[in-house]
Amino acid sequence: METQTLIYLFVGASFALYIGIALWARAGSTTDFYVAGGGVSPVMNGMATAADWMSAASFLSMAGIIAFSGYDGSVYLMGWTGGYVLLALLLAPYLRKFGEFTVPDFFGARYYSKTARVVAVICLIFISFTYIAGQMRGVGIVFSRFLEVDINLGVVIGMGIVFVYAVLGGMKGITYTQVAQYCVLIFAYLVPAFFISFMITGNPVPQLGLGSEVNDGSGLFVLQKLDLVLQDLGFAAYTDGSKSTIDVFCITAALMIGTAGLPHVIVRFFTVPKASDARKSAGWALIFIALLYTTAPAVGAFARLNFVETVNEQDYATAPGWFHNWETQNLIAWNDKNQDGVMQYRSGDAFAGAPVFTGETGPSGQRLVSNADAVGENEVYVDRDIMVLANPEIAALPGWVIALVAAGGLAAALSTAAGLLLVISSSVSHDLLKRTFRPDISEKGELLAARIAASAAIMVAGYLGIYPPGWVAQVVAFAFGLAAASLFPPIFMGIFTKWMNREGAIAGMVSGLGFTFLYIAWFKLWFPELDRPQNWLFGISAEGIGVVGMVLNFAVAIAVAKFTGPVPLHVRQLVARIRIPKGAETPHMH
């Protein structure tokens, strides 16, 4: 069977499974829509959390970043996994014991204020839309290559699929769909990794293969060979880092702390029957997440090695089929600068800025770009988001493995997109309508409002996917920075202090979110030409600035709380109730 036929078969079957599960588990009440009825088992919830957590950034981009950044890419591994542990141990059980539907619910009750709830909703929507832009972009990339459609059309198709199971199924449909998506995405990630590790090192376990000798008779270990190959081409050594220590620390910390403030992950712990189950499901999720995260460094290293060996010094006329497949999607390109018909992959840019494809062909057959006047020897442009998807093709693996990876990439992007959309819709329908502006709304009206809000959110998400501010993992890093600077401090202080009042929490959230957003926008949206280490505050990049925003949030909140009114007695009693183990086994629904 042809590879393209297998891709249609695998992707079609996985979509049919997701939609079938969503229809079977369709939400019939607001409890079903928001927290899946509150009766999901820890193992199932752990699997769903892992799928929700391992987005397109984890599946598509992380190994791509590691492949091209080497040591510098380790900040994503350390930050995201460390952050999940922080969330699981520090916040999740207490929020679950609080026992409401959403994160702004906690803000509204703990800070005894509708204003605090509304500010939390604004922060949450900001974070979720920033994050979802990366997911929809990932969906577009997978569709464009494997279903042979334009990236923008791929985003639209993805919007349609998410619409069905997020709008109809709510959290109940999403939870059971995400269990299936986890199984698909982890199988799709591990199978090619086993194949490629065995081909390069003779060891089928990628985690061990990364530290093994290359089976080409050279006696070199994988990372030694990669260092030598890249340095010969003018790149920095793969195992050397270029980021400053302060920036590495801040990016890692922003990703960690941002994880603990991510609303679509926090809300997963509201779906289990009791607080002790929140800890158990967090433990299971960590195991499921570790399967992918411990494999990613090997996937990145093997992908870069294979890419160099199959592209550099290759005659374009006899280039492998995968190169032309991705070239037609404008995600890889060659600019024959010296007119010799041979692809030179070196350090530096192949084009002046990002390539703008004209659709014409040059004298050597390459697809011309309108700004092909960059200096330097490098002739090859590659979008790093394609590396995981292209890896099986580069390694010439069987067609069914390529089809499996296509299905896995879509599962990763769609699972997180659905979770984010649900958070946005529940914030609008439950927190803004039911709890703030329309307290008399019926349950049926609230459910309808949630579905309308989800539909509107999908439209905005699609637009952001078509016009994304950066490549997938970078966009996601900004979402984590915003979460670290806005939601984490008031959640942390709301659980572990009795004296933090509403005025302090609101002032802290506004200042942290405002500062972090303006800093990111300054360097990434308004003045990207200034995005250089010498121009950064304290030498911290936009990816790591969330830590400074978090410190500002804490400082402003504590200062304002000292000069404003005391916390009411019933709120102090609420904090004590959340933190005392007695009664932790009580079912949460009231």
Image (cartoon, rainbow, N blue to C red):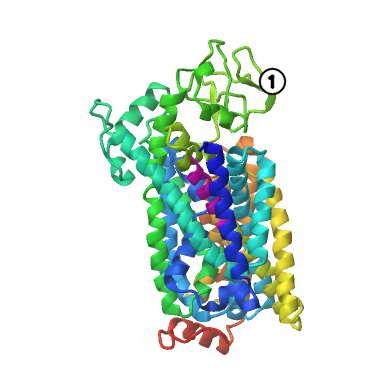
Q: Quadrant of residue 160?
A: bottom right
Residue for badge 1:
360
Measured as percent of width and height from the top left, residue 355 is found at 63, 28
Residue drawn 60% across the image and 42% down it: 141
Q: Amino acid at mark 1?
A: Glu
Residue 3 belongs to the span the image colors magenta: no
What's the magenta region? 402-415
Secondary structure character of the magenta stretch overall = helix
Measured as percent of width and height from the top left, residue 237 is found at 37, 31
Residue drawn 36% across the image and 25% down it: 229
Q: Is residue 425 left or right of residue 271?
A: right
Q: Quadrant of the C terminus?
A: bottom right
Residue drawn 40% across the image and 48% down it: 190
From this view, report whether residue 253 is shown above or below residue 43: above
Q: Is residue 379 left or right of residue 306?
A: right
Residue 408 belongs to the span the image colors magenta: yes
Measured as percent of width and height from the top left, residue 263 is found at 56, 65
Q: Nearer the viewer, residue 363 or 373?
A: 363
Residue drawn 69% across the image and 77% down it: 114
Q: Nearer the viewer, residue 162 or 251?
A: 162
Q: Is residue 417 left or right of residue 276?
A: right
Number of residues whose C-alpha sits closer than 10 Å to that of mark 1, classed few (under 14), some (14–19) or many (20 or more): few
From this view, report whether residue 274 is shown above or below residue 48: below
Q: Quadrant of residue 349?
A: top right
From this view, report whether residue 361 is shown above or below residue 513: above
From this view, report whether residue 33 is shown above or below residue 313: below
Element class at badge 1: strand
